[in-house]
Image (tube, rainbow, N blue to C red):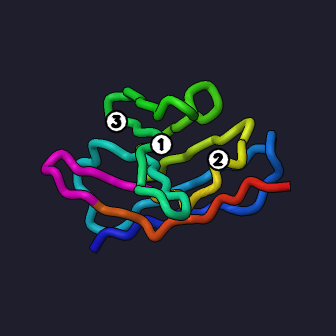
Amino acid sequence: QVQLVESGGGLVQPGGSLRLSCAASGSIFRINVMGWYRQAPGKERELVATATSAGGTNYEGSVKGRFTISRDNAKNTVYLQMNSLEPDDTAVYYCKLTTFTGLEYWGKGTLVTVSL
């Protein structure tokens, strides 16, 4: 059983920062990609950023230059540093883990609200 637990969400004013964390535990073998996705009210879930085991990263266009994804492979943890937050960043943020064998696991999500 694999569990992903996200933390770090909350309410922040426009222009502020938050750091999300996602820790994976359980029977995990050979993690390939760890990433963050988000789903805003009334919208489909979308990719935010991913980080591969080889160190490669990928970002959705609107977050480039504002968000930074990083991994601590020894701790099976992925982080998302979010700066210059905007109201359009308001969403539930989900962590996803993909193994080299193609298995996918999702966290339950953490809410980020950007508002005055």
Residue at x 27%, y 43% (from the top left corner): 32
Residue range highlighted in magenta? 95-104
- Give the x, y percent position of residue 51: 40, 37
| Left or right, 16 with reference to 21 | right
Given residues 74 and 115, the one toward you in this image is 115
To which residue does mark 2 refer?
88
Q: CA distance from mark 1 to mark 3?
A: 14 Å
Name, please, the residue furthest toward the bottom. 1
Q: Main secondary structure of the magenta part?
A: strand
Tag 1 and tag 3, C-beta contact below 8 Å: no
- State which quarter of the image contains the C terminus: bottom right
To which residue does mark 3 refer?
52
What SS does tag 2 mark?
A: helix
To which residue does mark 1 refer?
48
Can you tell which quarter of the image residue 80 is in? top right
Residue 20 on the magenta span: no
Given residues 17 and 39, the one toward you in this image is 39
What SS does tag 3 mark?
A: strand
Tag 2 and tag 1, C-beta contact below 8 Å: no
Can you tell which quarter of the image residue 50 is in? top left
Q: How many marks?
A: 3
Reply above or below: 27 against 73: below
Circle 2: residue type? Asp
Which badge, 3 or 2, is on the more N-terminal residue?
3
Given residues 32 and 67, the one toward you in this image is 67
Closer to viewer: mark 1 or mark 3: 1
What SS does tag 1 mark?
A: strand
